Image: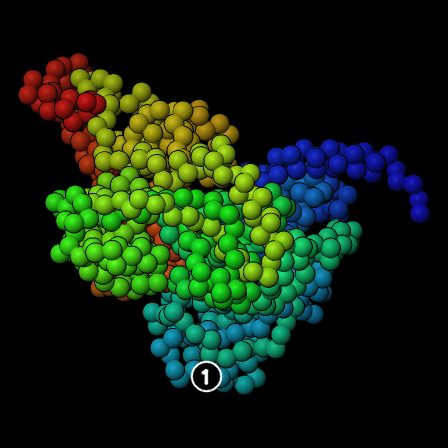
Amino acid sequence: MGVPDTTKLLFRGIAQLLFFSVMLLCLNPANAYLNRSYSTLEESKPFNGDFIDILGSGKLRILLTRDFSSADYLPRRASPLAEQQRIAEEFALSHGLIPELVIVDNFSKLIPALEAGLGDIIVDNLTINDQRLEKISFSVPVDHVNEQVIVAKTNKSLQRVRDLNGKRVMVSRDTTFWHALNWLKDNRYPEIEILETPDGIQNETVLDDLAAGEIDATIMDSNLVEIYKSFRDDIRVATNFSSQRDIGWGVRKNAPRLVSEINRYLQLEFQVEDHDKQFTGDFEQIRKRRVLRVLLRNNAASYFLYRGELMGFEYELAREFADYHGLRLEVVVPPGYRELTTWLLEGKADIAMGFLEPDDLQRRLGIDYSDPYHYAKQHIVVHKDDSAISLADLDDQTISVRSRSHYWKSLSRLQNGGAGFSLRATDDDVETEYLIQQVAHGKYQATMADEHLLNIELAKSIPVRSAHTLELEVQHSIALRKRNPGLKQALDEFVKRIYKSEFYNVTYLEYFKNKGSVQRLARGRIVDPLTGQISPYDELVRKYSDRYGFDWRLVTAQMYQESKFDPGAKSHIGARGLMQLMPRTAKEMGVKDISDPASSIRGGVKYLDWLRDRFDADLAISDRLWFTLAAYNAGAGHVHDARRLAGQLGHDPDRWFGHTEQAMLLLEKKQYAKKARYGYVNGSEPVNYVRDIKQRFEAYVDLSRDVAMTSPGLSGRLPDRRLAQLLDVFLPR
C-alpha cells in the first residue's frame, strides 16, 4: 500500500482538526441544527469531487426535498426518514464536515442536481433500481419498503391496482411510481389519468387533496405512509403497488471513495430494522443499539412542537439522559395514558414518562420505577370566582378527573375520610390542562391537578385557583420494565446527578414558572408621540418593511409584542433579539448576530416574508397577513392544521378571525390534536398574539394619522385630550 502524498496528509490533518473542533460544538446532538447549514439549488455551486475533495471543502451537501428537512411535523413514533437524515449528518460530522442541507422543491430534480454537482449525496427515500443505477451509484440499503396505493378512507371502490383505470393518480415525476404508472397506462389500463405533483407541493398537501376528493389516489413508500397514518385517519392503504424494494443513498458515479466511506459508516453505525419490532433488552442492549425509546404524551408539560422545535420538560430530561450516554432519542407518543405502561411491557419503548406516580398494581404487572425526579402537591382546582376556600366547601360539588389517574385515587381516599364531594370520570385520554380549562369555562365545577400543571394554566391567566391543597407531595418517577435492572441503575444515577441541578432548576423555571410569554397585552412605549416615532428602530423597520412589502407599523407592533424593543431579549425557549428569532431560523435567514438590531429586524421581516409564501397568494390580503403572524408565533404547520380543522368543522379556512382562530383553540384538546400533523399547540397563544398585534397596529395607524393631520411637517401638537388618550395607550404604567 503506497504512502499517502503530502496533499492527502494535509487534508487528513485538517479533517481531524475540524472533526475535534466540530465535535466539541456538537456534544449535544439535539443542538445539531446549530452546526448545519441550509441552501437551495439556486444557491449551490457545481462541485464534482470525490471524498478527498469533499474533505478539503469542509462540508457535505445533502440533497433532499422539503418534506424531510427537519421536524416539520410532531414525531409520534420513530421516523425512518428523519433517521436517514440524522445518520447522514452524523456521517459528515464524524469526518469533520459541516452538513449542508440542499433543499429541492421537487423529487424529480434530485438526481439531475446530483449529476450536476449541486450536492454530494441524496438522502430522500430513494429506491434502488436498474434505471437509476445507470445514472448514479448507491450506498448499501438503509431501508426496505413496499410501494402502496393510498386513497381516501371513504373510497371503498379502489381495492386493487386494476381499479386505478379511469382514476386520477398524482405522483412526482421520475419516481418509480411515475414510470410504473406510465407502463401500466401504455400496456394495460389506458384510462389511468396520471397527474404530476407540482413543484413545491409537499406530500401532506397531496393527501389533503386526496381526502377532499380532488384526486383519487397517490402512491407512496410504506415507511412514509406509516408516518402519515400516525396522525391522519382520513386515508387508507388500498393495496400494495410493488413487492419489497431497497432504499439507499444516491452518490455521483465519479465518487467511488465517497460510496466506500458511506458504506463503511452505515455498516458500523446503522442497521436496517423492522421499525415495528419490539425490544425488551436491558441497558447494555440499549447502548449497543444506541437508541433510547421513550413514551411521552403530547402536552404542554411533557412533549410538544413549538416554532419548529421539539420541547417539553420531560422531553428535555429524556434528551439529557440520552445525550449523557451517547444515545439517540426516539419519542413514541401513545394514544392514551393506559398505553404508557402496556406499550412499555410490550417492548415498544424502553422507558415511559408522564409525571407517573409509582403504582403497586403496575409493579405486580412487571413495571418498575426510577427514583423520583419530581415532587408535586395536588390541588383541587375551581373557577376563580368560586367561593370554596376549604375541603368542606366542596361538599356539593362534582370533581371531574380521569378514572385511571392518581388523582382519582387521591380523591377517593378523601371521600373515604368523610369528604362529601362527588367524583365524575372523564375520558382517560384527556389531558389535565384540558380539564382545568373546562373548569375555567364553567363546564366542570372542579378538577384536580399537580401543582406544576396548575402553574402552567395560571401563567396563562386562566381564571382558576386552588380551593384545597393535599398535605402530602406525590412522587413522579420514570417507568421501566422490571426485567431491566441495568437501566434502572442508570436512571437512578441520572436522577441523583440531575435533580435540583442548575440544568434542572432552569429548565423547570422555563416550563412551569415563567409568565412572560402569556401575559396580557402590555402597554407599549412611544419614544416621541408628538412626532409619530413609535420605536427606537423606526428607520430600520421602514427600510426592511418596504423591501419585503409590509406596513412598517405592523412590523413595529409585532416587534414590541416579541421583545418590547429590547435587542437583548431572550425567551425561555431560546428565541432572541428584537424579533425573537430561534437560532435555527436566524441561521436560515442569514442572521449571524441576533442581538444586532439591524440583523434581527432584517431576519425577522425576511422570515415573515417566507412565512407569507406558505399561504396562498389568492387569500384576502388581511387574512393572509393574520395567518402569517399566527405562523410566526406558533409555526406554519399548526396554522395549516387549524385551517384544515376549520374546514372540517364548517368554518371558513380562508379567514382567520372567527373561523380559523376558533379551530386553533381546539388544537389544545386531545381529540383534535391527535389527528393534527403537528399535534398539540397552546392555541390561545397565537390567537392572543394576532389580536394583540392587530390592536396595537391599529393604534399606531391612528397615531400616524393624527400626527399627519395636526402636525404638517411633523412639527405641530396634538389636541390635549387626544394626546392624553395616546399617552394612556402607549406609555407603560
Front-most of 552 and 2? 2
Indicate the position of residue 694 as horizontal and vertical percent values. Answer: 22, 38
- Please give the name of the residue rendered at 39% of the width and 35% of the height, measured from the top-left corner: 509
Indicate the position of residue 685 as horizontal and vertical percent values. Answer: 29, 44
Quadrant location, the C terminus: top left
Question: What colour scheme was applied to this rendering of the protein?
Answer: rainbow
Indicate the position of residue 606 as horizontal and vertical percent values. Answer: 41, 37
- Please give the name of the residue rendered at 60% of the width and 64% of the height, measured from the top-left corner: 279
- Please give the name of the residue rendered at 26% of the width and 35% of the height, measured from the top-left corner: 519
Figure check: 515 above or below 713: below
How many marks are shown on the rendered structure? Answer: 1
Front-most of 150 and 553? 150
Q: Which residue has dot 1 on it?
A: 159
Front-most of 279 and 33? 279
Figure check: 470 above or below 482: above
Neighbourhood count class around disc 1 (C-alpha, 10 Å): few under 14, some 14–19, many 20 upward: some
Residue positioned most to the front = 417
Whether residue 317 sits left or right of residue 278 in the image: it is left
Q: Considering the numbered disc 1 on the image, is that residue within a helix, a strand or a loop?
A: loop
Indicate the position of residue 115 as horizontal and vertical percent values. Answer: 67, 54
Figure check: 675 above or below 473: below
Answer whether residue 656 is visible to the viewer in this image.
no
Figure check: 387 above or below 171: above
Whether residue 332 sits left or right of residue 129 in the image: it is left
Quadrant of the rendered structure where residue 153 is? bottom left
Front-most of 255 and 109? 255
Answer whether residue 334 is visible to the viewer in this image.
yes
Three-letter code for the amino acid on which mark 1 is drawn: Gln
- Please give the name of the residue rendered at 36% of the width and 45% of the height, measured from the top-left corner: 473
